[in-house]
Amino acid sequence: MATQKKRNKSRTRPALKKSARKVVKLSSARKAASKKASNGNGLPKPSTKPYGQAGLALQGVRVLDFTHVQSGPTCTQLLAYMGADVIKVERPGGGDITRGQLRDVPNADSLYFTMLNGSKRSITIDSKHPKGMEILNRLIKTCDVLVENFAPGALDRMGLTWEYVHKTNPRMIVASVKGFGPGPYEDCKVYENVAQCAGGAASTTGFREGPPLVTGAQIGDSGTGLHLALGIVSALYQRIRTGRGQKVLCAMQDGVLNLARVKLRDQQRLAHGPLTEYSQYGEGVAFGKAVPRAGNDSGGGQPGWIVKCKGWESDPDAYLYFITQAPVWEAICDVIGEPTWKTDPDFATPKARLPRLKQIFARIEQFTMTMTKFEAMNLFNEHDIPCGPILSMKEIAEEQSLRATGTVVEVDHPTRGKYLTVGNPIKLSDSPADVRRSPLLGEHTDEILKDVLGFKAAEIAEIKASGAISAPEKKEQAA
Ligand code: CAO
């Protein structure tokens, strides 16, 4: 009835002049815009489902995961934790080389592999086999993102150039980790420590009198993987507007430099005088032309150092990081038993303290050596003094609060049994992390061929016989 009325109305509407029609058009556009704004810029109405029950953040995103070793797998594991369907393509026979590296349990996937490939599915495909390429083509058509960290040129040699992938699926985002960006080193293969050195981290890590040092945190591999994940999510977001994919490139050198940016800051400060918060300044040692290694000095304007605690003689981790934060200086003086330092002009101001940091930390250490690092942490925290115990990996593995938050997760694996992995360090209030064990090599090959790519049973049998997905059968066929 209402529709009928509307129709009649439009039929009886008198013809409008051209200019008047334009006004009508404009006002309806404005109306639509204001309706859109009141709806939240075209977003759906806020879900009424309880938080945590409205699906996972990246649900519906399918990732063709061509990554190996550490940098790329870090990225795709995070996407999988966030809910993406990550399909890891591995070479038949051995798969990702890390499956067999640093093995601790005979014949089981190593922790190196299992801790970087959780929540993914694994399919074996020989990309150099024509039938394998046929399967890959189907995957390219159905996936949203292709992630790879092969050596420069390897993806192109497979025939999967950007032009080819983009033509096959214009919506596909192609994300790569490489050692270096465009320039003199772009063709080089790169591993973690090379990136730490080339990104400026190693020259600024360690003690002044010693050689450059690499750090245990994998800032080159895992750090770049994290950068790549952000690039991918940004590209997915832009695709909502543009409808097309794009290339995302993260060079490990760039990723490390991004994490070492405070040292590039200090490099520029050097042109205007010595770096007064570096203990070398207090020790009267002249600065050279480049940022020196600063030992355990804290990077910012709040001087810090590592001090010994009770038991340091036998426990290599019985230490505390202590920060002489200016606003709590008086509390520090009281707690360590040097109340006169509160008013002594040699100690009362941050500037006066800078040349005396060695003496100050020696006194603090004398005090902390009388208690364990945890006792010291508790005591200083009562006075709002920032400090932190040096935790061993054993202590971290046993720390129950990290288990409670899902930062450390125990998962069960069919061939190696239970193991600990690092869960999602990024907590979303409406998207619980999906942390599951890593897949066995080719564990989901059949399921992906059938359910994702729609191959019929007879076609799957033909693929198997061709040797494109299974190394042993390839041998049998050849025999
Ligand atoms: N089927 C058939 N062939 C496959 C395949 C599959 N499913 N998956 C990979 N391959 C082939 C590739 O096509 C390539 O062959 P070609 O060189 O003949 O074209 C080869 O396997 C793998 O290439 P790679 O050069 O990437 O491997 P590598 O072990 O020699 O080098 C690494 C490893 C990490 C140094 C290199 O990949 C690299 O520099 N990557 C970029 C930077 C990076 O991510 N480094 C971090 C690594 S973690 O420390």
Image (tube, grey):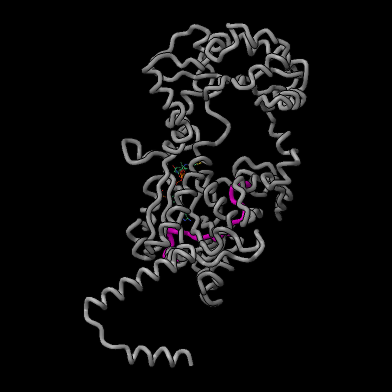
Relative image position of residue 377 (x, y in whole percent): 72, 26
Relative image position of residue 239 (x, y in whole percent): 41, 60
Give the mark count: 0
Residue at (58%, 68%) from the top-left corner?
446
Residue farthest toward the left in the current orientation of the protein: 18
Relative image position of residue 130 (x, y in whole percent): 41, 65
Question: Is 123 part of what is drawn in magenta?
Answer: yes
Residue at (52%, 8%) from the top-left corner?
283
Residue at (57%, 11%) from the top-left corner?
353
Compared across the picture, whether 251 is left or right of 20 comes to right
Viewer-proximal residue among 216 and 4: 4
Question: Is 91 part of what is drawn in magenta?
Answer: no
Viewer-proximal residue among 372 and 80: 372
Compared across the picture, whether 185 is left or right of 287 comes to left
Residue 134 visible from this viewpoint: no
Residue at (53%, 44%) from the top-left corner?
70
Q: Quadrant of residue 371?
A: top right
Viewer-proximal residue among 246 and 147: 246
Compared across the picture, whether 333 is left or right of 247 comes to right
Relative image position of residue 476 (x, y in whole percent): 55, 64
Task: Look at the picture and state if 438 lies above or below 33.
Answer: above
**Magenta segment range?**
113-132
Viewer-proximal residue among 115 and 392: 392
